[in-house]
C-alpha cells in the first residue's frame, strides 16, 4: 500500500464510538459527569494540600503532582472526545494528533515515575520513621518531582519521534484519541522494529519504577510483620493501602494497553480500557486518597467550615 501524505495539512479521522451509535448519548452524559468530578476532586486535593499545614508533607506534595497530572491528561483528551460524541466532525489535524500523542505519553511516563517515588516515600515513612524528615527533605522532593517530569517528557519525545517516522497508509484511526497501539496499526510496513524500540524506551521507565515499587513494598511488608501491635500494623497498612490500590489500577490498565503484542491488541477492548484510565482512574485517585485518609477529610471539613486557624 502507498503511504499517504502526513503533512500538517493532512489530519486523521477518529472512529471513536461510531460503531456503537446507540451508546454515544449515554457516553456523552457519563463522561461529562465524570470529567466534572475529576476537575473538582483533583483541584480540591491540590488546594487542600496547599492550604492545610498538616498536609505540608512529602506524601501530599507528590499527591498534588499526581492530581495535577490527572487534570492534564484528562483535559488533553476529554473535551475533544465530548465534541466528537456531540457532533459529526470527528477529525483531528496532523499537528493536533502528534501533540496529543506526545503529551499523553509524557504524562503517563511521568505518572509511572511518580508512583515509584511515592512508593519510596512510603518505605521511608514506615521503615525509617526516625530518619524520615532527613531522608525526604524538601530539596530531595523537589529534585525527584522535577526528574519525574523531565524524564517523562524525554521518554515521550523518543517514542513519539519513532512513531511519527513510520510511513502511514490510512488516516482512519480506530480510537477516540491518538493512542499509540491504534496508531501503530496505520503503518504501511511491519511495525515490529519500531515497536521493539518503543518497548525498550518504555522498559527503561517501567522496569525502574516497577523494581522501586516492588522493592519498597517488600521492605515495608517485612517491617510491618515484625510489629507486634495490631493497631500499629493496621496504621502502617492503611498508610500504604491507598497507594497500592492506585498503583494496581494504573499498572493493570497500562499492561493491557502497552505491553501486549500488537497482534493481540483488540481495537474495541482497547477503547473501553482507555475509557477506564482516561475517565475513571483520574476520579478514583482523589476518592481513594481522601476517603481512606483522615488528614484529607479533616482538611476538607476545615475549609468547608471556613476555619482559618492554621493549627
Image (cartoon, grey):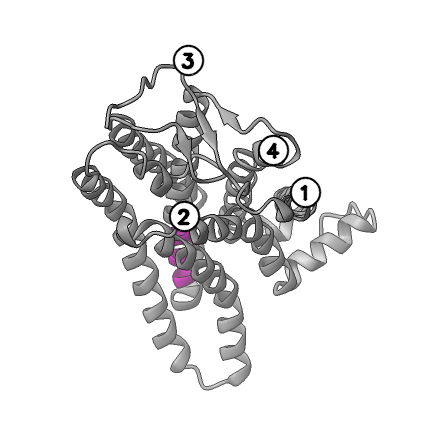
Q: Nearer the viewer, mark 2 or mark 1?
A: 2
- Badge 2 is on which residue? 267
Q: Is residue 117 magenta?
A: yes
Q: Whole-percent x and y of residue 48?
A: 66, 46
Q: Nearer the viewer, mark 3 or mark 1?
A: 3
Q: In screen coordinates, is 181 left or right of 302? A: left
Q: Whole-percent x and y of residue 132?
A: 43, 58
Q: Residues within 10 Å of mark 4 (few under 14, many from 20)?
A: some
Q: Which residues are magenta?
A: 114-124
Q: Whole-percent x and y of residue 112?
A: 38, 48
- Badge 3 is on which residue? 9
x 20%, y 34%: residue: 189
- Badge 4 is on which residue? 79
x 39%, y 31%: residue: 102
Q: Is residue 186 above or below residue 247?
A: above
Q: Which mark is residue 32?
A: 1
Q: Secondary structure at mark 4?
A: helix
Amino acid at each position: 500500500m502507498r503511504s499517504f501524505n502526513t503533512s500538517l495539512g493532512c489530519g486523521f479521522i477518529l472512529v471513536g464510538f461510531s460503531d456503537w451509535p446507540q451508546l454515544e448519548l449515554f457516553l456523552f452524559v457519563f463522561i461529562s459527569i465524570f470529567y466534572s468530578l475529576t476537575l473538582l476532586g483533583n483541584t480540591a486535593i491540590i488546594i487542600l494540600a496547599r492550604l492545610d499545614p498538616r498536609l505540608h508533607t512529602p506524601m501530599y506534595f507528590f499527591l498534588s503532582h499526581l492530581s495535577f497530572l490527572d487534570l492534564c491528561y484528562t483535559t488533553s483528551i476529554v473535551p475533544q472526545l465530548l465534541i466528537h460524541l456531540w457532533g459529526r466532525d470527528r477529525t483531528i489535524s496532523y499537528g493536533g494528533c502528534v501533540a496529543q500523542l506526545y503529551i499523553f505519553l509524557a504524562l503517563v511516563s511521568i505518572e509511572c515515575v511518580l508512583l515509584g517515588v511515592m512508593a519510596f516515600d512510603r518505605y521511608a515513612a514506615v521503615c525509617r520513621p526516625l530518619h524520615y524528615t532527613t531522608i525526604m527533605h524538601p530539596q530531595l522532593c523537589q529534585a525527584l518531582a522535577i526528574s519525574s517530569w523531565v524524564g517523562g517528557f524525554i521518554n515521550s519525545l523518543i517514542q513519539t519521534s519513532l512513531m511519527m517516522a513510520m510511513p502511514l497508509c490510512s488516516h482512519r484511526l480506530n480510537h477516540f484519541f491518538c493512542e499509540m497501539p491504534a496508531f501503530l496499526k496505520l503503518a504501511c510496513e511491519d511495525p515490529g522494529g519500531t515497536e521493539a524500540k518503543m518497548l525498550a524506551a518504555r522498559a527503561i521507565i517501567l522496569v525502574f519504577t516497577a523494581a522501586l515499587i516492588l522493592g519498597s513494598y517488600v521492605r515495608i511488608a517485612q517491617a510491618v510483620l515484625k510489629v507486634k501491635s495490631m493497631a500499629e500494623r493496621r496504621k502502617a497498612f492503611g498508610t500504604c493501602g491507598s497507594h497500592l490500590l492506585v498503583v494496581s489500577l494504573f499498572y493493570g490498565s497500562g499492561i493491557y494497553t502497552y505491553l501486549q503484542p500488537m497482534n493481540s491488541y483488540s481495537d474495541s477492548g482497547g477503547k473501553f480500557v482507555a475509557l477506564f484510565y482516561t475517565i475513571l482512574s483520574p476520579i478514583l485517585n482523589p476518592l481513594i486518597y481522601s476517603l481512606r485518609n483522615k488528614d484529607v477529610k479533616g482538611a476538607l471539613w476545615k475549609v468547608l467550615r471556613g476555619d482559618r486557624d492554621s493549627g
